[in-house]
Image (cartoon, rainbow, N blue to C red):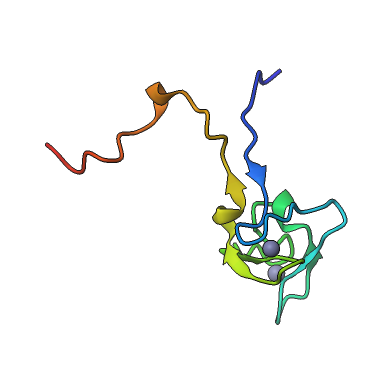
Amino acid sequence: MAGMLRQPDIHCPACGYKPRIEDRWACTPECGTVWHTFWTGGICPGCTRPWKTTQCPTCEKISPHRAWYHLPVDLPASRTEPAEQGVTR
Ligand SMILES: [Zn+2]
Ligand SMILES: [Zn+2]
């Protein structure tokens, strides 16, 4: 048992569409593999090309694949890295 995993919410950063099980993306033009890109983290199972962008099936806007993953905002502050402090050493 892996315990409690925080699953990011996956949805289109442009329109909020959540990918469905029946959605498919195509690796074009050369490869032609059709698969569910969120099952592999954007990696084509045919040619192992890591797709850095993902097109929304609904609004057709192309966004960075990582932008589809929205982590919960209620993370405890103790484990987050200091973002405002810049480089001090
Ligand atoms: Zn969209
Ligand atoms: Zn491919």
Q: Quadrant of ligand 1?
A: bottom right
Relative to the observer, which residue lies in front, 36 or 32?
A: 36
Above or below — where is 87 with respect to 31? above
Q: x%, y% of residue 56?
A: 70, 65
On the rendered structure, is 8 left or right of 35? left
On the rendered structure, is 25 left or right of 7? right
Q: Residue furthest front?
A: 15
On the rendered structure, is 25 left or right of 85? right
**Residue 34 appears in which quarter of the rendering?**
bottom right
Of the 4 image quadrants, the one containing the C terminus is top left
Q: Residue furthest bottom?
A: 29
The residue at the point 67 percent across, 47 percent down is 10
Q: x%, y% of residue 82?
A: 30, 34
Q: x%, y% of residue 60?
A: 70, 72
- How many numbered circles does the render carry? 0
Above or below — where is 68 with respect to 72? below
Q: x%, y% of residue 6?
A: 61, 30
**Residue 54 appears in which quarter of the rendering?**
bottom right
Of the 4 image quadrants, the one containing the N terminus is top right
The residue at the point 14 percent across, 38 percent down is 88
Above or below — where is 19 with respect to 70? below
The residue at the point 77 percent across, 75 percent down is 32
Q: Residue furthest right?
A: 22
**Residue 27 appears in which quarter of the rendering?**
bottom right
